[in-house]
Image (cartoon, rainbow, N blue to C red):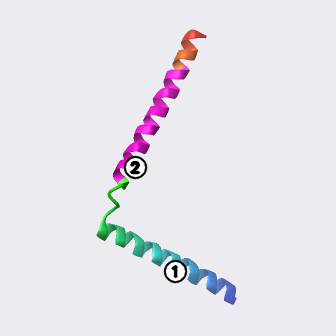
Amino acid sequence: MTSQAHTRRVSLLQKAIDEEHHLADVARDGYSPVTLPIVLAMIVGALILIVGLALAVSLIAYYW
């Protein structure tokens, strides 16, 4: 095994370990209080977009 391949594997392993530690920190500390309003706003925005597009298509088909 070459040194470069070994370094790449170690790097991937280190990234996986770092991500696991980050997820453990999030699970222990909880999410930021701002996360919930942001997620809800994105859901509402997506629903408005979907309903708006469906309404637009329906009106175009009706009046065509």
Residue holding disc 1: 14
Q: Is residue 41 magenta?
A: yes
Q: Amino acid at mark 1?
A: Gln
Q: Residue at x 49, y 22 (%)?
A: 55
Judge by depth and name the residue closer to the eye, 22 or 11: 22
Q: Is residue 37 left or right of residue 10?
A: left
- Distance from disc 2 to disc 1, alpha carbons, whole Å, reads 31 Å
Helix, strand or loop at mark 2: helix
Label 2 vs 1, first from the N-terminus: 1
Q: Amino acid at mark 2?
A: Ile
Q: Is residue 29 left or right of residue 42?
A: left
Q: Is residue 21 magenta?
A: no
Which region of the structure is painted magenta? 36-57
Q: Residue at x 57, y 80 (%)?
A: 11
Which mark is on residue 63? none
Q: Nearer the viewer, mark 2 or mark 1?
A: 2
Q: Position of residue 8 (x, y in %)?
A: 63, 81
- Please identify the quarter of the rendering in which residue 4 is found: bottom right
Q: Residue at x 54, y 11 (%)?
A: 62
Whether residue 10 is visible: yes
Residue holding disc 2: 38
Magenta segment main secondary structure: helix
Q: Residue at x 36, y 55 (%)?
A: 34
Q: Position of residue 14 (x, y in %)?
A: 51, 80
